């Protein structure tokens, strides 16, 4: 087959770019793929079946897509809130090329209601994004929850589920650090995006459990001074200074040590594709406490690898409370079936099966 792919940042350091490149690798094994993207080449994947058309100009990329229209059978587009996507979709509709759209978790309900940008997003959703969704030949959701979210936006029977993989996010398990100490959050110290305000309030409702079991909460990751200051203010507000340790800009060695000492990994999120740190935790077989909005909650619940909850203080607090029933025996969490499910080959096979079935 001859496929097209549009994701401007595919060769950059942007978080989703690794996932798009991994899907590209699978698609290009036995198919010709033309990639339309920016000129940035930090992580360019070279393969004889891949041809790149690169430009800083979106208009130039649209012209290139039009010129190559006779060489493309199906087209792939990624991510939810990139404002150039609807124009690519419109062009593809006009020239009669079927396209597959991957939102990557960016259409979650709370993301669309973010304070300060909700009005702009509402206009974008109704004027540009809904036509894109309605005209998509297939929409690829990462989870059952994301599928339900998209179904509330548009009436479509063309939504299929293909989870992102944990491959490429392996960390070393250190047996000498088998003694557990923490409930851990590692990731960007972005309060709104990662739901850290809700997480800290939920922890505060379980203070006695942390005190009684002598368990510490470790919060670590990348953060600007203003973000760190805001999180510390929340820790003070909820009187968690004796329970929560806050570290910023930790090294890879520190991260590996913290994860290896963790009972549970906590990661609520208002909007997510599949956070890197959650994949690392799954590789290390650390049970998770997460929300369905994280786009991983379905898998954690279905494969019994931790606790999933709705995005609310009471629901997350309840998940934390339940988790303490297991801290003396974490062997009840069997990660092997989940790890076998979350592979890039399974993801690309689901996508390619759609192409072949309707070729």
Image: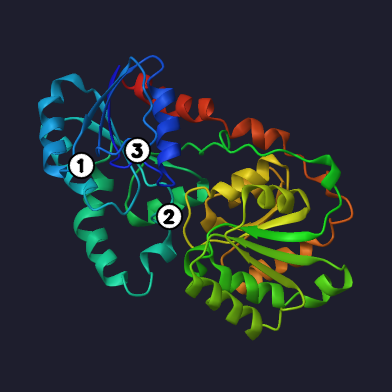
Please tell me whether residue 30 is drawn above or below residue 244 in the rendered image.
Answer: above
Using the numbered discs, state the Cα–Cα distance from disc 3 to disc 2 in whole angstroms: 26 Å
Q: Residues within 10 Å of mark 1 (few under 14, many from 20)?
A: many
Q: Quadrant of the C terminus?
A: top left
Using the numbered discs, state the Cα–Cα distance from disc 3 to disc 1 in whole angstroms: 18 Å
Please tell me whether residue 285 is drawn above or below residue 130 in the rendered image.
Answer: above
Q: How is the image coloured?
A: rainbow
Residue 106 image-quadrant placement: bottom left
Residue 71 image-quadrant placement: top left
Q: Secondary structure at mark 1?
A: helix
Residue that numbered label 3 is attached to: 10
Q: Residues within 10 Å of mark 3 (few under 14, many from 20)?
A: many
Q: Position of residue 141 (x, y in %)?
A: 44, 43
Whichever of labels 3 and 1 marks the residue nearer the N terminus, that label is 3
Q: Position of residue 52 (x, y in %)?
A: 25, 27
Between 297 and 37, the residue placed more toward the observer is: 37
Instruction: Report the mark closest to the observer, 2 or 1.
Output: 1
Q: Position of residue 336 (x, y in %)?
A: 72, 34
Kindly indicate whether the residue at mark 1 contacts the one at mark 2 (C-beta within 8 angstroms).
no
Total number of numbered labels? 3
- Asked whether residue 176 appears in the rendered view, the answer is yes
Q: Is residue 297 left or right of residue 53?
A: right
Instruction: Report the mark closest to the observer, 3 or 1.
Output: 3
Between 151 and 290, the residue placed more toward the observer is: 290
Which residue lies at the image location 71% right of the left edge and 51% below the top edge? 259
Whichever of labels 3 and 2 marks the residue nearer the N terminus, that label is 3
Whichever of labels 2 and 1 marks the residue nearer the N terminus, that label is 1
Label annotation for residue 89: 1
Residue that numbered label 2 is attached to: 149
């Amino acid at each position: 087959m001859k496929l097209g792919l549009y994701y401007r940042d595919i060769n950059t350091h942007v978080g989703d770019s690794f996932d798009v490149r991994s899907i590209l690798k699978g698609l290009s094994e036995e198919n010709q793929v033309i990639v339309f993207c920016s000129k940035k080449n930090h992580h360019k994947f070279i393969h004889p079946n891949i041809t790149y058309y690169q430009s800083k100009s979106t208009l130039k990329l649209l012209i290139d897509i039009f010129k190559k229209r006779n060489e493309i059978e199906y087209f792939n587009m990624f991510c939810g809130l990139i404002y150039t996507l609807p124009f690519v979709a419109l062009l593809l509709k006009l020239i009669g090329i079927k396209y597959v759209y991957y939102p990557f978790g960016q259409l979650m309900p709370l993301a669309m209601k973010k304070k300060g940008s909700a009005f702009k997003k509402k206009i974008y959703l109704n004027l540009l994004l809904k036509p894109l969704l309605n005209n998509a030949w297939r929409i690829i959701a990462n989870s059952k929850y994301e599928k339900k979210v998209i179904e509330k936006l548009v009436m479509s029977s063309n939504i299929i589920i293909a989870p992102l993989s944990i491959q490429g996010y392996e960390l070393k398990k250190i047996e000498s650090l088998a003694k557990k100490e923490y409930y851990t959050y590692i990731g960007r110290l972005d309060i709104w995006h990662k739901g850290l305000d809700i997480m800290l309030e939920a922890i505060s409702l379980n203070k006695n459990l942390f005190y009684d079991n002598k368990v510490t909460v470790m919060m670590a990751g990348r953060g600007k001074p203003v973000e760190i200051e805001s999180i510390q203010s929340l820790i003070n507000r909820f009187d968690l200074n004796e329970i929560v340790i806050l570290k910023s800009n930790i090294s890879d060695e520190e991260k590996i040590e913290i994860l290896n000492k963790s009972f549970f990994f906590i990661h609520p999120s208002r909007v997510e594709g599949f956070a890197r740190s959650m994949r690392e935790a799954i590789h290390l077989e650390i049970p998770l406490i997460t929300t369905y909005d994280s786009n991983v909650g379905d898998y954690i619940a279905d494969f019994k690898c931790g606790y999933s909850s709705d995005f609310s203080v009471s629901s997350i607090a309840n998940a934390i409370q339940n988790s303490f029933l297991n801290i003396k025996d974490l062997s009840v969490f069997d990660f092997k079936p989940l790890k076998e499910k979350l592979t890039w080959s399974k993801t690309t096979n689901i996508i390619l099966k759609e192409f072949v079935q309707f070729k």
